[in-house]
Image (cartoon, rainbow, N blue to C red):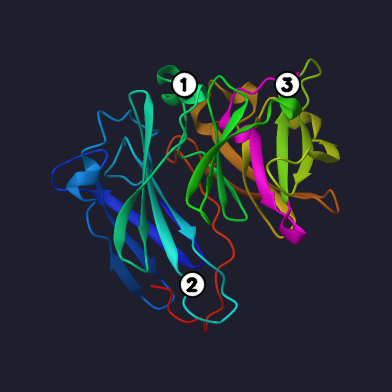
Amino acid sequence: RDRRDGRFLLDRAAPAGSTAFTEVAVCDPLSRRCLLLPPIPDALAASVDNPYLQRGGDDGGLQSRSNEIFLASRGNDDRGEELPFAVIWMACCRGKLVAFSFCSGSREWSALSPPVHHALSMRRVMGVRLGQRNHAHGCFYWMITLTRRWLVLDTRKMEFSILDISPVLAGRSMMFSNQITTLESGEGRTTVVVSDLFRADKRCVLYFYSFMHFSDRWQLLNKITLPEEWGDRFRGIIGAFEGCLYIKLDHPKQNLGDPVEQNVTYFWFDLKTMQVGRFTEISSATVNEAYLYTGFPPSLSLPSV
């Protein structure tokens, strides 16, 4: 389901067959250690009322799910000690968002308090794609459907907030959550990449903005027009690593009727040299989603679980 700081988060369907509550484990593949998390207590689980189904994963056993779980860091590694971590559990219910946090220090689950905001009304909370989140400097970001706002979780404080980003999205058609990507920049700044699609010239343009604090006015850093042949094929940025964006392209339009050619291609795009390279290609008939895994710890790192 997720990876962070050398750990992997895994889950599987519980014996009861619930799509919301799964068996969860955090693993350190380098040291071959694994921690099976306790179930969410009944007192907390009682607040989860008919959660909406989220996008199905590619884990085989679960074709659809009504929760999203992911890892979060809880501190820094300056002292060389084991880095604490948290597991965040979220679900969209009727007119509300429910979230829990598991802390590796206390080994207990606790409830988080999402903000009360009209942007999270019954109609709109249904469309929050919990699996399509962005992360930078300890904060997670989700686009809220039919609004130009972000749902933000600051894991340093374990607090939610709503951020209005409409000024930088004015005049642009935002149809997909993955049209916005966040990157970590130096000095604690966050870089936001906005993909401008559905243009009259059928080109895809990337706008790069930067901010330090949520209240800051976003600074426009750069504007890059992607290759012309990518315009109709662009399906989002799946991640970034060491100055490169990893971009997902759909199969060419002329091959839509040929299932053999319905492949998805991934490219890397170097932001400094402006060079483009093909990363990999997979068949869209066999793989629904692909995820980017980068930044593994050194081989002599201490166990993290």
Taking the magenta stretch, the answer to whether it contains residue 184 is yes
Helix, strand or loop for disc 3? loop
Q: Residue at x 44, y 64 (%)?
A: 85
Find disc 3 in the rendering and name its residue.
172
Q: Crowding near pointer 2: few (<14 within 10 Å), some, many (20+)?
A: some
Task: Name which of mark 1 and mark 3 comes first in the sequence.
Answer: 1
In space, the residues marked 2 and 3 are separated at their CA atoms by 40 Å
Which residue lies at the image location 24% right of the left edge and 51% below the top edge?
Answer: 40
**Callout 1 amino acid:** Arg
Stretch in magenta = 170-189
**Residue 161, image x and y in percent?**
54, 38
Between residue 175 and residue 115, name the one nearer to us.
115
Dot label at residue 266: none
The residues tagged by marks 1 and 3 sit, at their Cα atoms, a distance apart of: 20 Å
Q: Identify residue for label 2.
A: 83
What SS does tag 2 mark?
loop
Amino acid at the residue labelled 2: Leu
Q: Residue at x 17, y 41 (%)?
A: 17
Q: Is residue 47 above or below residue 154?
A: above
Question: Is residue 199 positioned above or below 209 on the image?
Answer: above
- Residue 146, how many percent across, how many down? 55, 19
* First-in-chain label (1 vs 2): 2
Marks 1/2: CA–CA distance: 36 Å
Residue 124 circle label: 1
Residue furthest out toward the top: 200
* First along the sequence among labels 2 and 3: 2
Residue 176 is one of the magenta-drawn residues: yes
Q: Is residue 247 visible?
A: no
The answer to whether 160 appears left or right of 205 in the picture is left
